[in-house]
Image (cartoon, rainbow, N blue to C red):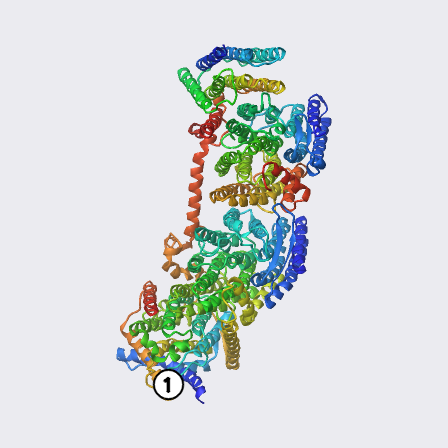
Amino acid sequence: MKNLYPLFNVIIALAAAPLMFGVINRIKAFFAGRKGPPLLQLYFDIGKLLRKGAVYSRTTGIFFRLAPSAGLIAVLTALLFIPCGAYPAVLFFPGDMVLVVYLLGAQRFCMLLAALDTGSSFEGMGAGRDAHFSVFSETVLFLCLAAMSAASGSVSLNGMLFTAGGRIWQVSPPVLVVVVFVLYIVLLAENYRVPFDDPNTHLELTMIHEVMALDHGGPDLAMLEYAAALKFWILASLPAGLLFPHGMKPDFFGNAALFLGLIALTAALTGALESCAARLRLVKVPQMLTAAAALSVVALIFLAK
Amino acid sequence: MLDVILMLLVLFNLFSLGSTRISASIRVVAYQGAAIGVVPLFLPGKIPGGILVTIVLVTLLVKAGILPWFLRYAQKRVNVRREEKPFVGASASILSGVAALGTAFFISSRLPIPFAVASPFIVPVALSVSLTGFFIIISRAEALSQVIGYLILENGIYLFGIALLLEQPLLVELGMLLDVFVGIFVMGITVFHISREFEHTDTSRLSGLADWLPEVKRSE
Amino acid sequence: MVFIAAALLLLLLSGLCALFLNNRPATAAALCAPACIAGCLAALFPVFAVFFSGQEMSFDLLWPAAGGLRVFFTLDRLSAFFLVPMLLLSALTALYGWGYLRRERNSESCGRQWFFFNMLVASMLSVFLAADGLFFLFCWEMMALSSFFLVVSRDEEESVRRAGFIYLAASHAGTAALFVVFAFLSAAGNSGGFWNSAAFPGPGDGILRVLLLSLGIFGFGMKAGFIPFHFWLPRAHPAAPSHVSALMSGVMIKAGIYGILRMFSVTGGGEVWCGAVLIIAGICSGILAMLSALNRRDTKSVLAYSSIENIGIICMGTGLAVYAASCGGNLVCLLALSGALLHLFNHAFFKGLLFMAAGAAGKSCGSRDPDVLGGCAKTLPVTSSAFFLGAAAASGVPLLNGFPGKFLIYLAAFCGLQLKGSGLLLPSTAVIAGLSLSGCLSLACFTGLSGIVFLGKPRSRLDRPEEYSALMGTAMISAAAACLFLTFAAPLLSFSLCGAVSAVFASTDTASAPGLADRLAPLSCVSAWAFALIAAALAAKRLLLRRRKVSFGETWNCAYAAADARMQYTSASFFYPLRRTFTFFNSRRSPAAVSKTIFFPGEYEGDDSRRIGAFRTFLSGIAAKLEVSLSCLRWLQQGRLHIYIMYIMAALLALLLWKIR
Amino acid sequence: MAILLFLVPFAAGLAAFVIKSDRLRRRLLFSVACAHAVFSLYLCLFPSGGEDYRWLWFGLDALGRYFTAVFSLLFLCASFYAVIYLKEEKSRPREKKEEGLLFNNAPEAAFTGCLLVFLASMSLLALSRHFGLIWIAMEATTLVSAPLIYFHRQRSSLEATWKYLLICSVGIALALFGNLFLAVSASGQGPGTEISIDRLLGPGVRLDPLWLKAGFIFVLVGYGTKMGLAPMHTWLPDAHSEAPSVASALLSGALLNCAFLAILRFYQLCLANGLGPFCRELFLIFGILSMAVAAVFIIGQSDYKRLLAYSSVEHMGILCFAVAVGTAYGSMLQAANHSFLKGALFICAGNILAGFRSKKIADVRGIAHIMPWAGVLWFAGILAICGMPPFGAFLSEWIILKAAFSSGNLWLPAVYLFLLGVIFIGMTGTGIRMTFGVPSIPEGKKSFLSLLPALLLLLLSLFLGIYMPAALDGAVSGAAALLGGQG
């Protein structure tokens, strides 16, 4: 029973991931003084989409149909390597964080090709920008992972976030705060949130993720959205795992609740940010991410001593 | 007596350097050849008289006879009176002739002859004659005067050989003489060709074959 | 070893025959391609024997030439590791070339091309086997020469001739450096091993060793083509016929890496500074090459740059290994070097695949400029899927064979971070950053390239393209199969990887280190699991859509109905943001070189020739300066007899006055 | 017996002047060349019982045998080409492209006769054991090769002839001085010591070192002029570019080697009298200077025959360099390779000139497309002479490089490699420009026969590159042994 707990954690993640977007939207609505959509809106959408048929553009080919499923699977696979608070990941082996990041890259690969497959200039634009930002965000993510690994003395996500437990904080708290901050920036960039992208403008010109989803519909779109939610969960659980209070030894449900709370907190933070911050100019984005990279390098150097 | 001849040779050098008239320099070369030809008579060597006489006669015949005559003939053929524009003027040439003499003495002072010689001046004079020949080839523009320079150069060498190494097997010496002879002839023939092709024998204008073009040619 | 001799003989003889069949291209191809394939397969027997068993074999035959040139073959684990991809890829490219050259315009050069192709294969085979220094140089030069002739096979174009000349000059400069190295590496009397290093200064042996090692890195690096020795590569590889570019990019440039490794192995391991140099060169190549690739409007030229990038990755791994070996990081060394070798192994296949597919697409569509292509995925199923597979592998998608090598290098770097105080922190961090940055860039580059070339609508009215030749298709399919197989077979290579590593660094005991197989197995499992899940997901989707309406329409262009092909994103526009961010690196002009007409932007005119990189312009600048200064010396030969004779007199007098005293 | 090597061609040469019928004369030329080649090759590969042949001032030791074999093989191919060339010269309208002026050729009889006498005098040089005789032979080669250069009766070739004649005569005059100095230094052995190699190399002969040094300087400068060492090389590009290609091939392939042989004869004496280091130093200076000068003029050269001429200067430098760093073996091998390759290249150049009617590199494009054989041989020759495998020059230059390294001073190989690299780039750049590309003339002349000799010579060098039979190796190392070369 006990060694099935990690599996349960994954199931919780699968179940709760879409909730986070609901949280974000509620927070934004709250800031805007509106009531906002229900928390479970994304569940309803996905359900509805799954019940729909499909419309494909004549321009598109096999890739367009393949991409959503492949992307979803890539993210799902990545999810299996994420430890959940006081409980280990389902799978782990030395170097699995590299695999996780590259699986996210694989999902991006599918998305970009699907976008280019439509032959629409808007989607091409979105793809170009996505490729552009990812160059920086992934590098920053790797540098953070390097810092975490140097701090925890382990070469797998499980070791960094679970085995090391709270001990990682004894190395150098301020530096780890920096790392958490940078991880949060990466989270924003990778999930196309403000200030890197504005998910709910009504100008396709300014969007990245939404515009790449323009031509998808039905089950494909459902998979796309669900994959996005899972991606948010994965990236959010890195800072969450760092911040997790390993000191108190929670039982399974307590741990789950705690972890869920942390991720919800991240989501809420994102929502708050989105409602009070504006989107950066495209030119500024690389500069911000470069600054994040610089921060993580600084963290790494401090950890190394 | 030997030293007097050597002295004369040096004077001939300076004269040939000084004169820009072709015929004059040809005459000087003839005198020089004659002087060199008689050198063996004054050598204290113990050479059978017959051979000695042969050498003297052959040398005189070639160097003072045939070659100057041929040069005169060539001069008439291509019809050049005088060195129109030598690269180095007469007085400067004479001075450099003196310099050549100095150099020759300097070098020969570093080359002590390992055996007893008739006169200590043989080596330096021979060298200076050759250097003069060199200088004439370099400083004269007329093809013919370059041939003359070459002949003077050979004279120097011949003097060296005949004055120091008379004991050397004669066949070789005469072979050398013969070669010089043929050489001068071939050169002369070439000079004829030049004068026929270019209507002049000014070798300073024979610079068509080059890897570097001066501005004047470039502009053309 | 009789197999290898047979293979060499087969290659040379068939090549010679092809030389005389110059005017009958079909016959020449039908003779040479099978001969080449057969030769490679024959040579594979002993190679596989060594590859899997591990004990080296060697034979030598005295070849009475001046200086006692001995042909001294040795086949050890390192050379076997390089030979496997070399032979397989040669066979594939021969098959491909059979179809490729069959419909050449100017058929008169085909026999010649086959001759040089087989010469190239034979010389590569013997380069990896040559144990005698002089014989190695011999084969090395032959390799450069035959590939040069293949590069200039389309010599009517000025650019091709130029590329050929630059290639020849560069490789000769490298070889000159190697001459120096091998003057010390080929002492008389070879003692069975590789490259008798009796005369070579040993470790800690002062300036001479430093000089020789750096000369070696220069000479071999000139062949490997990492920055700054890359300038010939983006010119030469696109200029060559596609099967040759595949061979050159896939295998030939690896000979440089082989040389560097072999040099380290025979001279008692590299030194820390070698590692640092290699890491820096690798990072520069990894990043700068991809940045320059963004500017290319020629598919094969992009691929050439990506080869530079991959060589850079291999260099990072090698450098990290050398560094760690001299810092006592046993595990790091093992992981890094085996990562580098594994990536080298895999790169041979996916880059070969990419070049073949690019060549096929170019043949079918009649152009290699992405911005006039597009939408050929539907008409060229085999070519396009081959290219997508290669692109996915090249951009490091974990489910394909481009990933495991990078993974091992990452792992090595992360392990390096753990060894506090060993001085490995800096190189490891650098390697991690460099690897990730170059990886992302290549992902961006390859998605853009393959998407623009094969997806969307055709951008120009090309006559409907069709698959060029079945033989080429076969070659591409088998290369793709090899890529897929290698994804799962990575753990199987671990034994020979360890062997190769221990052949380079005798110090690292590969036995004590935890097995590579355990490191690589999870990847294969995950790939298998992911493939299965994807299949399941597709099946589920089909199930869902079974009884529902699936309709087709136009692409949603934000309510603009009449969008036509010319409005699609081009590669220029796709890469615009990246180019703009990295303007500083890749071009002197701002990338927004769009000639503004009154209303609409005109043709994008980023000419590629000027963007090959600052280094080459720097070199050509030096060459120009040299030529000018030399031409100043030409007045020496100014045509005046008097001056000439004065030279003689001056020389004579100078010598006399100087020497006689 | 070996005296026939001199007598037969000499007699044939004299005969050629008087023979009226062209066909007979050409046959004579070719058959004499064949006989000469066969005989000298036989002598070289199978020295009769190792006993060197002697007859008063004549003799043939290993060195002489080797050089004779080399230039006689070259002469065989050259004469074959000459026969074809003379046939064509008779037919084609003689009109020079650059200036467009008409010119006619020297009488064919004179040309053939001079060729044969040239061969004779070279054999005499290799045969003679007396320094005076060597000098006479050398002067003779100059005098008989002058008409060869002036075959095309036109201004430029006349100018070249004049320069050649004067410069070489001056040089040889200096060499004569050198001989006299030698005689002076030998006079310690009593008056009238004949200055023959065997006498002076005899047991217990001590020469006066100072005069010997001076003599060597004079000889090096004098014969060096003939050999084309910088800075005395100035006649060489003019003569080679203006002479008909067959003459250029002989001049640079055979004559330069013979001058080198003459210098080596003197070097033997110096070695015997312990002046080895002194001579090697001078060799080093002239060698490196020649390579450098050649590099300067090869980069951006505009005339491909001049290009070949400068490459000859470079290779003469390499020969001296090799002797200087102590590998006479490499020097001998390089000499043979250079002779064959340069002969092949000049014959190709002749064909190209006949096809394109221009010596300007800029006017020649795409040889490989319209004159396939010429293109292939030309480019192969250029690569080969730059030391690319599988040709022989690769090996000999490698041997020289290793010797340079073992000489201890690391600067020598560095400079050597650098200059070779620069020259490689210059030559191959030109080669690519000429060989490939879109042809600059509609159709060339496709005659394989006139390229056969070039092919043979290239094959010879290829043979030297990949296989060295014991007899040949013995010949080379025998020659090297005379120069104190350990092989």
- The residue at which mark 1 appears reads as A256
- Residue D312 sits above or below residue D124 on the image: below
Horizontal side of C332 relative to C100 (left or right) equals left
Q: Quadrant of the C terminus of chain C?
A: top left
- Evaluate whether residue C533 shows in this view: yes
Q: In terms of depth relative to the viewer, which is nearer, B50 or C253?
A: B50
| Residue D447: % across, % down | 66, 38
Q: In terms of depth relative to the viewer, which is nearer, C575 or C53?
A: C53
| Residue D7: % across, % down | 70, 26
Q: What amino acid is found at the position of numbered circle 1 in the picture?
A: Ala
Horizontal side of C360 relative to A171 (left or right) equals right
Place residue A247 in its image quadrant: bottom left
- Evaluate whether residue A121 shows in this view: no
| Residue D331: % across, % down | 58, 39
- Residue B116 sits above or below residue A133 on the image: above
Residue at point 42% right, 38% down? C629
Chain bearing tag 1 is A
- Residue C494 sits above or below residue A4 on the image: above
Q: Alpha-carbon neighbours of circle 1 within 10 Å: few (<14), some, or many (≥20)?
A: many
- Residue A14 sits above or below residue D276 on the image: below
Report the label total.
Answer: 1
Residue placed farthest to the front in the image? D204
Q: Quadrant of the N terminus of chain C?
A: bottom right
Horizontal side of D65 relative to C268 (left or right) equals right
- Secondary structure, mark 1, is helix
